[in-house]
Amino acid sequence: MSLKEFDLTGRVAVVTGCSRGLGQVFARALAEAGADLIITSRNIESLKPFQAEIEALGRRCMPWACDVRDQKSIERMAEAAFQRAGKIDILVNNAGCNVRKPALDVTWDDWNLILDTNLRGTFFVSQAIGRLMIEEKYGRIINIGSVTSVNGYAGLGPYGASRGGVKQLTMSLADDWGVHGITVNCLAPGWFKTAQNAVMYEDAEWVEYLSDRIPLKRPGQPSDLRGAIVFLASEASAYITGQTLLVDGGITTGAVRALPKRDRI
């Protein structure tokens, strides 16, 4: 194997939810690895500064308004992306949302917003882009999950249900579409500071509490995700499908200290 296995030159990637946060981290990493981009958000104007940044890297970048809760909007995006680029090689299903509430306070509308965006949206974007990939007999679909895909946390019931569903959906689509040369994997970040959870990181005591439960003793940084997204998008992962890659500093190894501090090396 050589570094050529990770080269994305000539590939075209769709990344949803690119107006801020981890969506831009993923898209930037793919562009730096050589891919051209179609980036989406509900508000196309919010994408313009990031579009300029990607184009400054020498990559083509098309912004497009897409609401993943609206099937027609998804279908228009897929058609426009294909017409502009002629193919879609990589899809990153990043668009998502959260409402952080105790379970007894979650409303019907809260549940629908989260599940419609994170789970239903991931499926129907995958379906729309998957049709195009099947024609080409090639594709890399990367669903963005979370540490909540495998662990449960108070206050994150609907969000955890949606991300757990993404993990299961990943395995199903991998089985459906592997025959067409398409891999489908889930990239599951651990505890990273994003716009959705920024308020938590303002609490120094909570950050210390969290870090103590992470074997690497710190929350994630955006740079920790770059290698993983390029790996799953590239030929380096050609024989990997249906898997969930946790980039979590090891927190899912177990959050309870089993030895007193004096006995830990």
Image (cartoon, helix red, strand yellow):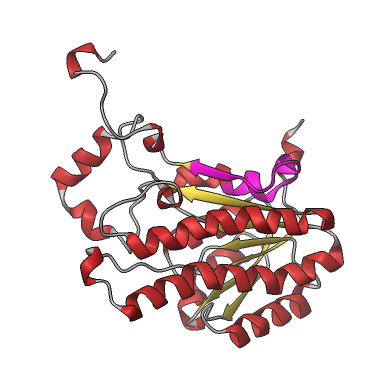
What residue is rendered at 72% in x and 36% in y? 3
Q: Is residue 106 above or below residue 155?
A: below
Q: What residue is drawn where x is 85% and y is 60%?
A: 137
| Percent x, y of residue 182 | 76, 56
Question: In the figure, is residue 70 to the left or right of 157?
Answer: right
Residue 175: give x, y in percent of width and height: 73, 53
Residue 226 to residue 144: above or below? above
The x, y position of residue 222, in whole percent, is 43, 49
Most distant residue in the front direction: 104
Residue 235 in the magenta stretch? The answer is yes
Q: Give the residues drawn in magenta, as a range.
A: 229-246
Magenta span has 257? no
In-front residue for pair 51/70:
70
x, y percentage for residue 171?
64, 52
Which residue: 49% across, 81% down?
A: 42
Residue 181: quadrant of the picture: bottom right
Quick one: quadrant of the N terminus? Answer: top right
Farthest residue, direction bottom: 72
Quadrant of the rendering where the C terminus is positioned: top left
State whether residue 117 is above or below residue 200. below
Identified at 45% across, 63% down, the residue is: 162
